[in-house]
Image: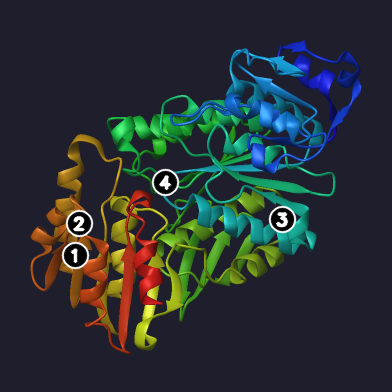
Protein backbone atom coordinates (compact mmCIF):
# COMPACT_ATOMS: atom_id res chain seq x y z
CA UNK A 1 0.00 0.00 0.00
CA UNK A 2 1.04 3.62 -0.51
CA UNK A 3 -0.80 6.30 1.45
CA UNK A 4 0.34 9.49 3.19
CA UNK A 5 0.29 9.83 6.95
CA UNK A 6 -1.90 12.91 6.57
CA UNK A 7 -4.51 10.93 4.60
CA UNK A 8 -4.53 8.27 7.31
CA UNK A 9 -4.99 10.95 9.98
CA UNK A 10 -8.07 12.20 8.12
CA UNK A 11 -9.47 8.72 7.51
CA UNK A 12 -9.39 7.82 11.22
CA UNK A 13 -10.52 11.30 12.36
CA UNK A 14 -7.44 11.43 14.56
CA UNK A 15 -5.41 14.18 16.22
CA UNK A 16 -1.74 14.26 15.34
CA UNK A 17 1.03 15.13 17.79
CA UNK A 18 4.57 15.36 16.46
CA UNK A 19 6.68 16.50 13.54
CA UNK A 20 4.23 17.92 10.98
CA UNK A 21 6.75 17.41 8.18
CA UNK A 22 6.10 13.67 8.51
CA UNK A 23 2.44 14.09 7.52
CA UNK A 24 3.47 14.23 3.87
CA UNK A 25 5.51 11.03 4.08
CA UNK A 26 4.17 7.89 2.40
CA UNK A 27 3.25 4.81 4.43
CA UNK A 28 3.87 1.50 2.68
CA UNK A 29 2.90 -0.87 5.48
CA UNK A 30 0.80 -0.92 8.65
CA UNK A 31 1.62 -3.32 11.47
CA UNK A 32 -0.06 -4.14 14.78
CA UNK A 33 3.01 -6.08 15.97
CA UNK A 34 6.04 -4.07 17.13
CA UNK A 35 8.27 -7.07 16.34
CA UNK A 36 7.45 -6.74 12.63
CA UNK A 37 8.09 -3.02 12.32
CA UNK A 38 10.39 -1.81 9.54
CA UNK A 39 11.59 1.69 8.71
CA UNK A 40 8.76 4.11 7.87
CA UNK A 41 5.99 1.62 8.74
CA UNK A 42 2.94 2.81 10.66
CA UNK A 43 2.29 1.08 13.99
CA UNK A 44 -1.33 0.68 15.06
CA UNK A 45 -2.10 -0.18 18.69
CA UNK A 46 -4.89 -2.71 19.17
CA UNK A 47 -6.44 -3.60 22.53
CA UNK A 48 -7.24 -7.26 23.21
CA UNK A 49 -8.48 -9.23 26.18
CA UNK A 50 -4.95 -10.00 27.37
CA UNK A 51 -2.86 -7.26 25.78
CA UNK A 52 -2.78 -3.57 24.94
CA UNK A 53 -0.91 -2.73 21.75
CA UNK A 54 -0.56 0.91 22.82
CA UNK A 55 2.02 -0.26 25.37
CA UNK A 56 4.32 -1.23 22.48
CA UNK A 57 4.00 2.00 20.51
CA UNK A 58 7.20 3.54 21.88
CA UNK A 59 9.14 0.37 21.02
CA UNK A 60 7.74 0.52 17.48
CA UNK A 61 8.86 4.14 17.06
CA UNK A 62 12.37 3.28 18.28
CA UNK A 63 12.50 0.42 15.74
CA UNK A 64 11.83 2.81 12.89
CA UNK A 65 8.06 3.34 12.69
CA UNK A 66 7.22 6.69 11.12
CA UNK A 67 4.33 7.17 13.54
CA UNK A 68 1.89 5.29 15.76
CA UNK A 69 -1.89 5.25 16.05
CA UNK A 70 -2.92 4.92 19.71
CA UNK A 71 -6.13 5.27 21.70
CA UNK A 72 -4.54 6.32 24.99
CA UNK A 73 -2.14 9.15 25.73
CA UNK A 74 1.23 7.40 25.85
CA UNK A 75 3.70 9.63 27.69
CA UNK A 76 6.76 10.84 25.78
CA UNK A 77 5.49 9.23 22.55
CA UNK A 78 6.37 11.35 19.54
CA UNK A 79 4.60 11.32 16.18
CA UNK A 80 1.34 9.78 17.32
CA UNK A 81 -2.20 9.90 15.99
CA UNK A 82 -4.77 9.78 18.77
CA UNK A 83 -8.04 7.94 18.05
CA UNK A 84 -10.97 6.68 20.10
CA UNK A 85 -10.62 3.04 19.05
CA UNK A 86 -7.67 1.32 17.35
CA UNK A 87 -9.79 -1.47 15.84
CA UNK A 88 -12.17 1.00 14.26
CA UNK A 89 -9.23 2.99 12.90
CA UNK A 90 -7.86 -0.17 11.28
CA UNK A 91 -11.26 -0.84 9.71
CA UNK A 92 -11.52 2.68 8.25
CA UNK A 93 -8.08 2.49 6.65
CA UNK A 94 -8.79 -0.97 5.22
CA UNK A 95 -12.17 0.14 3.85
CA UNK A 96 -10.51 3.05 2.05
CA UNK A 97 -7.69 0.92 0.62
CA UNK A 98 -10.10 -1.76 -0.63
CA UNK A 99 -12.26 0.89 -2.32
CA UNK A 100 -9.19 2.29 -4.10
CA UNK A 101 -8.23 -1.11 -5.50
CA UNK A 102 -11.54 -1.74 -7.30
CA UNK A 103 -10.77 -5.48 -7.65
CA UNK A 104 -13.69 -7.96 -7.44
CA UNK A 105 -13.95 -9.47 -3.97
CA UNK A 106 -15.63 -12.67 -2.80
CA UNK A 107 -16.59 -12.86 0.88
CA UNK A 108 -17.44 -16.19 2.50
CA UNK A 109 -19.13 -17.00 5.78
CA UNK A 110 -20.94 -20.02 7.20
CA UNK A 111 -20.80 -22.38 10.15
CA UNK A 112 -18.70 -24.93 8.28
CA UNK A 113 -16.63 -25.02 5.11
CA UNK A 114 -15.49 -21.38 4.95
CA UNK A 115 -11.79 -22.08 4.58
CA UNK A 116 -12.18 -25.03 2.20
CA UNK A 117 -14.55 -23.03 0.00
CA UNK A 118 -12.13 -20.09 0.08
CA UNK A 119 -9.26 -22.35 -0.99
CA UNK A 120 -11.37 -23.80 -3.81
CA UNK A 121 -12.37 -20.36 -5.11
CA UNK A 122 -8.78 -19.19 -4.83
CA UNK A 123 -7.60 -22.21 -6.81
CA UNK A 124 -10.21 -21.60 -9.52
CA UNK A 125 -9.28 -17.92 -9.86
CA UNK A 126 -5.56 -18.79 -9.92
CA UNK A 127 -6.19 -21.15 -12.84
CA UNK A 128 -8.19 -18.43 -14.58
CA UNK A 129 -5.66 -15.59 -14.19
CA UNK A 130 -2.60 -17.84 -14.49
CA UNK A 131 -0.97 -17.22 -11.11
CA UNK A 132 -1.66 -17.46 -7.36
CA UNK A 133 0.19 -14.16 -7.00
CA UNK A 134 -2.68 -12.38 -8.75
CA UNK A 135 -5.19 -13.44 -6.08
CA UNK A 136 -5.38 -12.00 -2.57
CA UNK A 137 -6.58 -14.68 -0.13
CA UNK A 138 -7.02 -14.12 3.59
CA UNK A 139 -4.60 -16.33 5.51
CA UNK A 140 -5.54 -18.89 8.15
CA UNK A 141 -8.10 -17.52 10.57
CA UNK A 142 -7.71 -13.87 9.50
CA UNK A 143 -11.48 -13.50 9.44
CA UNK A 144 -12.37 -11.15 12.30
CA UNK A 145 -12.35 -7.38 12.86
CA UNK A 146 -8.54 -7.40 12.99
CA UNK A 147 -7.62 -10.14 10.53
CA UNK A 148 -9.93 -9.10 7.69
CA UNK A 149 -8.79 -5.44 7.57
CA UNK A 150 -5.14 -6.55 7.72
CA UNK A 151 -5.82 -8.87 4.77
CA UNK A 152 -7.37 -6.05 2.74
CA UNK A 153 -4.38 -3.80 3.42
CA UNK A 154 -2.26 -6.37 1.57
CA UNK A 155 -4.10 -5.84 -1.73
CA UNK A 156 -1.52 -5.06 -4.43
CA UNK A 157 -1.93 -3.42 -7.84
CA UNK A 158 -0.88 -6.66 -9.55
CA UNK A 159 -3.76 -8.62 -7.99
CA UNK A 160 -6.95 -9.18 -9.99
CA UNK A 161 -9.29 -10.73 -7.37
CA UNK A 162 -9.65 -11.05 -3.60
CA UNK A 163 -11.19 -13.94 -1.62
CA UNK A 164 -11.75 -13.52 2.12
CA UNK A 165 -13.44 -15.27 5.01
CA UNK A 166 -15.72 -13.59 7.52
CA UNK A 167 -16.09 -15.17 10.95
CA UNK A 168 -18.04 -14.03 13.98
CA UNK A 169 -18.61 -14.51 17.68
CA UNK A 170 -21.06 -11.68 18.29
CA UNK A 171 -23.99 -9.96 16.58
CA UNK A 172 -23.08 -7.23 14.15
CA UNK A 173 -19.55 -8.50 13.44
CA UNK A 174 -20.33 -9.84 9.96
CA UNK A 175 -22.21 -6.63 9.10
CA UNK A 176 -19.17 -4.59 10.13
CA UNK A 177 -16.79 -6.74 8.09
CA UNK A 178 -19.04 -6.79 5.03
CA UNK A 179 -19.35 -3.01 5.01
CA UNK A 180 -15.56 -2.71 5.16
CA UNK A 181 -14.93 -5.20 2.33
CA UNK A 182 -17.92 -4.32 0.09
CA UNK A 183 -18.00 -7.74 -1.64
CA UNK A 184 -19.07 -8.31 -5.23
CA UNK A 185 -20.03 -11.89 -4.35
CA UNK A 186 -21.12 -13.01 -0.87
CA UNK A 187 -21.31 -16.72 0.00
CA UNK A 188 -23.03 -18.42 2.94
CA UNK A 189 -21.99 -22.08 3.00
CA UNK A 190 -24.44 -23.30 5.66
CA UNK A 191 -25.95 -22.63 9.08
CA UNK A 192 -24.88 -24.94 11.90
CA UNK A 193 -24.25 -24.99 15.64
CA UNK A 194 -20.77 -23.39 15.60
CA UNK A 195 -20.57 -20.48 18.12
CA UNK A 196 -24.17 -21.10 19.23
CA UNK A 197 -23.04 -20.11 22.74
CA UNK A 198 -22.99 -16.48 21.58
CA UNK A 199 -26.27 -16.47 19.63
CA UNK A 200 -28.64 -18.70 21.59
CA UNK A 201 -30.04 -20.62 18.63
CA UNK A 202 -29.37 -21.62 15.03
CA UNK A 203 -31.96 -19.04 13.99
CA UNK A 204 -29.84 -16.40 15.73
CA UNK A 205 -26.78 -17.67 13.88
CA UNK A 206 -28.64 -17.52 10.55
CA UNK A 207 -29.66 -13.92 11.17
CA UNK A 208 -26.10 -12.94 12.10
CA UNK A 209 -24.56 -14.75 9.12
CA UNK A 210 -27.03 -13.11 6.73
CA UNK A 211 -25.51 -9.74 7.64
CA UNK A 212 -22.88 -10.51 5.00
CA UNK A 213 -25.36 -9.20 2.43
CA UNK A 214 -25.48 -5.75 4.08
CA UNK A 215 -22.23 -4.68 2.40
CA UNK A 216 -22.84 -6.52 -0.87
CA UNK A 217 -22.51 -4.12 -3.80
CA UNK A 218 -25.64 -2.93 -5.61
CA UNK A 219 -25.09 -5.34 -8.51
CA UNK A 220 -23.52 -8.01 -6.30
CA UNK A 221 -24.57 -11.65 -6.19
CA UNK A 222 -25.58 -13.63 -3.08
CA UNK A 223 -24.65 -17.33 -3.06
CA UNK A 224 -26.91 -19.43 -0.79
CA UNK A 225 -27.23 -23.11 0.10
CA UNK A 226 -30.67 -24.03 -1.30
CA UNK A 227 -31.00 -27.03 1.02
CA UNK A 228 -30.16 -25.23 4.26
CA UNK A 229 -33.00 -25.24 6.77
CA UNK A 230 -32.69 -21.45 7.01
CA UNK A 231 -32.70 -20.86 3.26
CA UNK A 232 -35.79 -18.64 3.38
CA UNK A 233 -34.23 -16.47 6.10
CA UNK A 234 -31.05 -16.06 4.08
CA UNK A 235 -32.88 -15.33 0.84
CA UNK A 236 -35.03 -12.70 2.55
CA UNK A 237 -31.87 -11.05 3.87
CA UNK A 238 -30.57 -10.86 0.29
CA UNK A 239 -33.65 -8.90 -0.80
CA UNK A 240 -33.08 -6.77 -3.92
CA UNK A 241 -29.88 -8.68 -4.66
CA UNK A 242 -29.38 -11.29 -7.35
CA UNK A 243 -29.31 -14.76 -5.74
CA UNK A 244 -27.63 -17.91 -7.03
CA UNK A 245 -28.23 -21.17 -5.16
CA UNK A 246 -26.27 -24.40 -4.83
CA UNK A 247 -27.13 -27.86 -3.53
CA UNK A 248 -27.36 -31.55 -4.30
CA UNK A 249 -30.80 -31.43 -5.95
CA UNK A 250 -32.30 -29.79 -9.04
CA UNK A 251 -33.98 -27.08 -6.94
CA UNK A 252 -30.62 -25.31 -7.02
CA UNK A 253 -29.01 -23.23 -9.77
CA UNK A 254 -25.79 -25.22 -9.33
CA UNK A 255 -26.37 -28.88 -8.48
CA UNK A 256 -25.13 -32.45 -8.96
CA UNK A 257 -26.98 -34.34 -11.70
CA UNK A 258 -25.13 -37.58 -10.95
CA UNK A 259 -21.85 -38.97 -9.67
CA UNK A 260 -20.18 -41.99 -11.27
CA UNK A 261 -16.86 -43.40 -10.01
CA UNK A 262 -16.07 -40.21 -8.15
CA UNK A 263 -16.75 -37.89 -11.09
CA UNK A 264 -19.68 -35.53 -10.53
CA UNK A 265 -21.73 -34.14 -13.39
CA UNK A 266 -22.66 -30.65 -12.26
CA UNK A 267 -25.40 -28.54 -13.83
CA UNK A 268 -24.80 -24.80 -13.81
CA UNK A 269 -26.42 -21.75 -15.45
CA UNK A 270 -23.51 -21.84 -17.92
CA UNK A 271 -23.85 -25.51 -18.81
CA UNK A 272 -22.73 -28.90 -17.51
CA UNK A 273 -19.23 -29.57 -16.18
CA UNK A 274 -17.77 -32.89 -15.02
CA UNK A 275 -15.51 -32.56 -11.99
CA UNK A 276 -13.68 -34.97 -9.71
CA UNK A 277 -13.71 -33.47 -6.21
CA UNK A 278 -10.67 -34.99 -4.54
CA UNK A 279 -11.52 -33.87 -1.01
CA UNK A 280 -13.43 -36.52 0.94
CA UNK A 281 -17.00 -36.26 2.16
CA UNK A 282 -20.37 -35.06 0.90
CA UNK A 283 -19.81 -31.79 2.77
CA UNK A 284 -16.79 -31.09 0.58
CA UNK A 285 -18.88 -31.73 -2.53
CA UNK A 286 -21.22 -29.02 -1.23
CA UNK A 287 -18.24 -26.74 -0.62
CA UNK A 288 -17.23 -27.33 -4.24
CA UNK A 289 -20.74 -26.40 -5.42
CA UNK A 290 -20.56 -23.15 -3.44
CA UNK A 291 -17.16 -22.39 -5.00
CA UNK A 292 -18.49 -23.15 -8.48
CA UNK A 293 -21.48 -20.84 -7.97
CA UNK A 294 -19.23 -18.03 -6.73
CA UNK A 295 -16.89 -18.48 -9.68
CA UNK A 296 -19.76 -18.37 -12.17
CA UNK A 297 -20.87 -15.15 -10.48
CA UNK A 298 -17.38 -13.82 -11.27
CA UNK A 299 -17.89 -14.87 -14.93
CA UNK A 300 -15.08 -17.42 -14.82
CA UNK A 301 -15.28 -20.10 -17.58
CA UNK A 302 -16.19 -23.69 -16.70
CA UNK A 303 -12.80 -24.96 -17.94
CA UNK A 304 -10.97 -22.89 -15.32
CA UNK A 305 -13.52 -23.93 -12.68
CA UNK A 306 -12.89 -27.61 -13.45
CA UNK A 307 -9.09 -27.20 -13.29
CA UNK A 308 -9.27 -25.22 -10.08
CA UNK A 309 -11.46 -27.70 -8.19
CA UNK A 310 -9.54 -30.74 -9.38
CA UNK A 311 -6.18 -29.25 -8.36
CA UNK A 312 -7.22 -29.05 -4.68
CA UNK A 313 -6.07 -32.24 -2.94
CA UNK A 314 -6.14 -31.22 0.72
CA UNK A 315 -6.57 -28.26 3.05
CA UNK A 316 -4.39 -28.10 6.16
CA UNK A 317 -6.09 -29.50 9.24
CA UNK A 318 -9.31 -30.29 7.40
CA UNK A 319 -9.62 -34.00 6.58
CA UNK A 320 -5.97 -33.81 5.53
CA UNK A 321 -4.58 -37.25 4.64
CA UNK A 322 -1.20 -38.12 6.15
CA UNK A 323 0.97 -41.19 6.55
CA UNK A 324 0.82 -42.24 10.18
CA UNK A 325 2.40 -44.68 12.60
CA UNK A 326 3.24 -48.08 11.04
CA UNK A 327 2.13 -46.76 7.65
CA UNK A 328 -1.51 -46.23 8.65
CA UNK A 329 -3.75 -43.61 7.04
CA UNK A 330 -4.13 -40.64 9.37
CA UNK A 331 -6.89 -38.09 8.73
CA UNK A 332 -6.01 -34.76 10.32
CA UNK A 333 -9.23 -32.81 10.95
CA UNK A 334 -7.93 -30.88 13.94
CA UNK A 335 -8.47 -27.30 12.78
CA UNK A 336 -11.78 -27.02 14.62
CA UNK A 337 -14.95 -28.90 15.52
CA UNK A 338 -18.67 -28.46 16.00
CA UNK A 339 -21.51 -31.02 15.86
CA UNK A 340 -22.08 -30.74 12.10
CA UNK A 341 -18.41 -30.96 11.15
CA UNK A 342 -17.91 -33.80 13.64
CA UNK A 343 -20.72 -35.82 12.05
CA UNK A 344 -19.33 -35.11 8.57
CA UNK A 345 -15.87 -36.32 9.62
CA UNK A 346 -17.33 -39.47 11.19
CA UNK A 347 -19.15 -40.16 7.91
CA UNK A 348 -15.84 -39.94 6.05
CA UNK A 349 -14.17 -42.35 8.48
CA UNK A 350 -17.11 -44.77 8.36
CA UNK A 351 -16.77 -45.01 4.56
CA UNK A 352 -13.11 -46.04 4.68
CA UNK A 353 -12.19 -49.65 3.91
CA UNK A 354 -9.88 -50.26 6.87
CA UNK A 355 -9.76 -50.75 10.65
CA UNK A 356 -11.34 -47.50 11.81
CA UNK A 357 -10.03 -45.57 14.83
CA UNK A 358 -11.60 -42.32 16.00
CA UNK A 359 -9.71 -39.93 18.30
CA UNK A 360 -11.74 -36.95 19.51
CA UNK A 361 -11.58 -33.94 21.81
CA UNK A 362 -14.13 -31.46 23.10
CA UNK A 363 -16.26 -29.22 20.87
CA UNK A 364 -16.30 -25.64 22.17
CA UNK A 365 -18.66 -22.64 22.22
CA UNK A 366 -21.86 -24.71 22.28
CA UNK A 367 -23.54 -22.91 25.17
CA UNK A 368 -26.09 -24.40 27.55
CA UNK A 369 -26.66 -27.49 25.39
CA UNK A 370 -22.98 -28.46 25.20
CA UNK A 371 -23.51 -31.72 27.10
CA UNK A 372 -26.52 -32.61 24.93
CA UNK A 373 -24.52 -31.98 21.74
CA UNK A 374 -21.69 -34.21 22.94
CA UNK A 375 -24.10 -36.99 23.89
CA UNK A 376 -25.64 -36.78 20.41
CA UNK A 377 -22.20 -37.32 18.85
CA UNK A 378 -21.79 -40.42 21.01
CA UNK A 379 -25.09 -41.75 19.69
CA UNK A 380 -24.02 -40.92 16.12
CA UNK A 381 -20.76 -42.83 16.53
CA UNK A 382 -22.70 -45.81 17.85
CA UNK A 383 -24.60 -46.04 14.54
CA UNK A 384 -21.34 -46.39 12.60
CA UNK A 385 -19.03 -49.38 12.64
CA UNK A 386 -15.87 -47.93 14.17
CA UNK A 387 -13.38 -50.37 15.67
CA UNK A 388 -11.94 -48.10 18.36
CA UNK A 389 -13.02 -44.76 19.83
CA UNK A 390 -10.82 -42.80 22.23
CA UNK A 391 -11.26 -39.30 23.57
CA UNK A 392 -9.99 -36.67 25.96
CA UNK A 393 -11.56 -33.58 27.47
CA UNK A 394 -14.26 -33.04 30.08
CA UNK A 395 -17.12 -32.86 27.58
CA UNK A 396 -15.83 -35.72 25.44
CA UNK A 397 -16.50 -38.05 28.37
CA UNK A 398 -20.19 -37.70 27.51
CA UNK A 399 -19.40 -38.80 23.94
CA UNK A 400 -17.54 -41.88 25.15
CA UNK A 401 -20.28 -42.79 27.64
CA UNK A 402 -22.93 -42.68 24.92
CA UNK A 403 -21.18 -44.44 22.05
CA UNK A 404 -20.44 -47.47 24.26
CA UNK A 405 -18.69 -50.46 22.67
CA UNK A 406 -14.91 -50.29 22.41
CA UNK A 407 -14.61 -46.69 23.64
CA UNK A 408 -12.17 -45.25 26.18
CA UNK A 409 -11.75 -41.85 27.79
CA UNK A 410 -8.45 -40.38 28.98
CA UNK A 411 -7.75 -37.45 31.30
CA UNK A 412 -4.92 -36.16 29.14
CA UNK A 413 -3.52 -36.47 25.62
CA UNK A 414 -0.30 -38.14 26.76
CA UNK A 415 -2.16 -41.15 28.20
CA UNK A 416 -4.39 -41.29 25.11
CA UNK A 417 -1.38 -41.27 22.78
CA UNK A 418 0.44 -43.98 24.72
CA UNK A 419 -2.66 -46.21 24.57
CA UNK A 420 -3.58 -45.69 20.93
CA UNK A 421 -0.01 -46.33 19.77
CA UNK A 422 -0.48 -49.93 20.87
CA UNK A 423 -3.66 -50.26 18.77
CA UNK A 424 -2.62 -48.78 15.43
CA UNK A 425 -1.79 -51.22 12.64
CA UNK A 426 -0.69 -50.82 9.04
CA UNK A 427 -4.28 -51.22 7.83
CA UNK A 428 -5.69 -48.74 10.37
CA UNK A 429 -7.40 -45.51 9.36
CA UNK A 430 -7.19 -42.94 12.16
CA UNK A 431 -9.31 -39.78 12.33
CA UNK A 432 -8.28 -37.05 14.79
CA UNK A 433 -10.69 -34.16 15.50
CA UNK A 434 -11.49 -31.58 18.16
CA UNK A 435 -12.01 -27.86 18.69
CA UNK A 436 -9.10 -25.45 18.34
CA UNK A 437 -8.55 -25.01 22.08
CA UNK A 438 -8.05 -28.77 22.51
CA UNK A 439 -4.87 -28.68 20.36
CA UNK A 440 -5.54 -32.13 18.95
CA UNK A 441 -2.78 -31.53 16.40
CA UNK A 442 -0.46 -32.64 19.22
CA UNK A 443 -1.96 -36.11 18.82
CA UNK A 444 -1.42 -35.96 15.06
CA UNK A 445 2.22 -34.97 15.57
CA UNK A 446 2.74 -37.91 17.92
CA UNK A 447 1.26 -40.38 15.43
CA UNK A 448 3.07 -39.21 12.27
Callout 4: helix, strand or loop?
A: loop
428 on left or right of 117: left
Q: Nearer the viewer, mark 4 or mark 3?
A: 4
Tell me: residue 413, above or below residue 170: below
Q: Position of residue 243 (x, y in %)?
A: 56, 39
The residue at the point 66 percent across, 60 percent down is 124
Residue topped by disc 3: 300
Residue topped by disc 4: 190
Residue topped by disc 2: 377
Screen quadrant of the C terminus: bottom left
Q: Nearer the viewer, mark 1 or mark 3?
A: 1
Tell me: residue 162, above or below residue 22: below
Residue topped by disc 1: 381
Is residue 217 visible from the viewing direction of this image? no
Screen quadrant of the N terminus: top right
Q: Earlier in the sequence, mark 1 or mark 3?
A: 3
The CA distance from mark 4 to mark 3 is: 23 Å
The local crowd at label 3, few if under 14, some if 14 to 19, many if 20 or more residues have their Cα within 10 Å, is some
Amino acid sequence: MRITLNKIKKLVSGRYYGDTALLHKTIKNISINSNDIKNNDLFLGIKGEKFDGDNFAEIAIKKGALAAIVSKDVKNLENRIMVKNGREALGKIAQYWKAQSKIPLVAITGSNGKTTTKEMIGSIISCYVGSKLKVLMSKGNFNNDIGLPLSLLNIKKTQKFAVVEMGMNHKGEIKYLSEIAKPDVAVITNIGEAHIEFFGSKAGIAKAKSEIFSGLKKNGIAIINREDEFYSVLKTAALRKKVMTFGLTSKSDVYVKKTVQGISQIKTPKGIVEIKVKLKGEHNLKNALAAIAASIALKIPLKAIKRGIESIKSVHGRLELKKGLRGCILIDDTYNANPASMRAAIDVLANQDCEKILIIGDMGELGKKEVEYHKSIGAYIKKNKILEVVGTGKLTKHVIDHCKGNAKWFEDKKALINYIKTKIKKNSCVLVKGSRFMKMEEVVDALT
